[in-house]
Amino acid sequence: MAERQHGRWGGAAVMAGLVAGVCACATGCSGTNAAAEDVNGSGDAVGAVHGAATALREAGSSQARTSMEMATGGTRVTIRGQGVYDFRRQLGRLTVRLPQDPAGAEEHRPITELLAPGALFMKNRGAGVPADKWVRVETATVSDGNLVTGGATDPFTAVEVLLGARTATRVGRTEVAGTPVWHYRGTADLALAARGASAGSRAALQAAAKGFATASVPFDVYLDDQGRVRKLRQRFSFVNDRQKDPVAVASTTLLYDFGAPAVVTLPRATDIYAGKIADS
């Protein structure tokens, strides 16, 4: 019970301290000229989008890059991450870099994040956390389900959001990093996505459906000829305690080098920080 309470408290601190704090301190893809083409009845496009999660599980693993752009009150910041992800075990490791402060000095050491079903682990969190300790956040207890909290959207959870797509449009053929892809555009419903998601993502998506300013998530996804996501851009909107106006978030996930080794070892209980996290 104590661990669960810490995860809930820590999640609130991460949301307020990492995301809102970054916003406070700061002063898609290759396109196509083809006209948007509605697939007959949108069934083929919807089926392709819904099949993306299965295609990734079949691929096994990949390298990943993430980008999260946040805008509120005229302020815009970008947080970037890079690492690997195991889609079968739903485990990932990212190095997340926060933006520089207005003076140009680096504000924070890179944060190491471990992604797991139901949990986010963060090292180099700062805010009074010892350098050799991890902070654990239970993703079902934060209002965005960790689609925004850690400054990077869990790649597999992001793809499972696509299960909430009721309609989709096939925009056309293009390339991502030299790979031919099909570009699809649509809007997903988080509550619907949660009902169809895997056990590892379901609770997080349910939390996001309730916590975001709107449960509708516009997306652009680029699928290769094996149905695997090469690029996914999603737009979220949330309100937190430190921001009166909704924060607009554009989250982009790039997946490449499928089959790359993705060894992720979760922290031991003794390596997880149980103390108070200071406000950032």
Image (cartoon, rainbow, N blue to C red):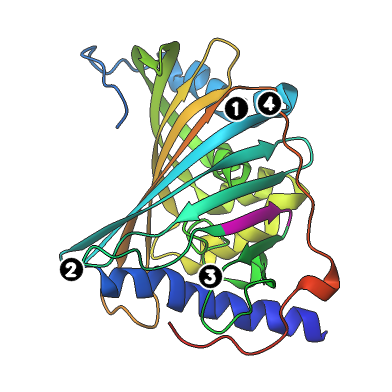
Indicate the quadrant containing the C terminus: top left, top right, bottom left or bottom right.
Answer: bottom left
Q: Which mark is residue 260?
A: 4
Q: Position of residue 199 (x, y in %)?
A: 77, 50
Q: Nearer the viewer, mark 2 or mark 3?
A: 2
Q: Position of residue 119 (x, y in %)?
A: 70, 62
The kind of residue on which mark 4 rests is: Ala
Residue 212 sits in which quadrant? Answer: bottom left
In this rendering, the answer to whether 37 lies above or below 16 is above
Q: CA distance from mark 1 to mark 2?
A: 38 Å
213 vs 159, left or right, is left
162 within the magenta span: no
Q: Secondary structure at mark 1?
A: helix
Give whichever of discs 2 and 3 has the lower sequence position.
2
- Identified at 39% across, 34% down, the residue is 186
Q: Nearer the viewer, mark 1 or mark 4?
A: 4
- Identified at 80% across, 86% down, the residue is 2
Residue assigned mark 3 = 143
Q: Position of residue 83 (x, y in %)?
A: 58, 41
**Count of numbered marks:** 4
Give whichever of discs 2 and 4 has the lower sequence position.
2
**Towards the viewer: 40 or 212:** 212
Residue assigned mark 2 = 27
The kind of residue on which mark 3 rests is: Ser
Q: CA distance from mark 2 to mark 4?
A: 38 Å
Stretch of the chain drawn in magenta? 112-117
- Identified at 37% across, 14% down, the residue is 175
- Identified at 15% across, 65% down, the residue is 74
